[in-house]
Image: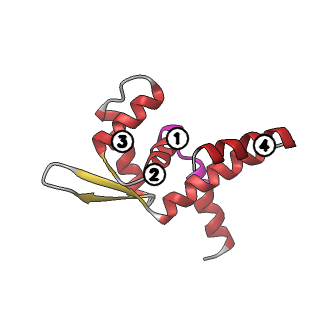
Amino acid sequence: MSEAQTLTETSTARNLTAFQKNILTILSEEAMYGLAIKRELEDYYGEEVNHGRLYPNLDTLVEKGYVEKSELDKRTNQYELTDEGLAVVVDVLQWTLSKFVNDDERAEQIRELVADNE
C-alpha cells in the first residue's frame, strides 16, 4: 500500500462522525447485536437513540470495512469490529492523547485511568 493510500484511508476514518466513532469504541469491547449497541449508546448519551439513526450508521461502518455484520438468527444481526475499525479507535485515542498529555500531571491521570480499567 502506498503512502498516499494510507493517508487517504486515515483521512477518511478521521472524517467519521462522533456517533460512528462511539459505535466503534463500543464494539472494541466485544461483538454485539444492534439492540445492545443501542443500549450502550443510550447509556452514554443519556437519551434515546432511535433505530433510524443507529442502523444507517452501522451500515456505513460495514460498507467502509470497519465493522463486520453477521447473522445471529433470522431476526438478529451481530456486529464486530474489524482490524481496520480497531485501527480507527486507536488512531482517535492516539490523537486525543497527543493533545491532552502535555505534562507529567496529565500523563499520571491517564496512567490512573488505564490502571482503573485493567
Sequence-first tag of 1 and 2: 1
User: What residue sits 57% from the left and 45% below the top?
Assistant: 117
Amino acid type of disc 4? Glu
State the image coordinates of residue 2 (x, y, percent, origin top left): 65, 75
Residue 108 tag number: 4
Q: Is residue 112 above or below residue 81?
A: above
In-front residue for pair 6/49: 49
**Dot 4: element:** helix
Amino acid type of disc 3? Ile
* Circle nearer the viewer, 2 or 4: 4
Sequence-first tag of 4 and 3: 3
Label 3, on which residue? 37
Q: Is residue 3 above or below residue 19?
A: below
Q: Which residues are magenta?
A: 11-19
Label 1, on which residue? 17
State the image coordinates of residue 79 (x, y, percent, origin top left): 34, 54
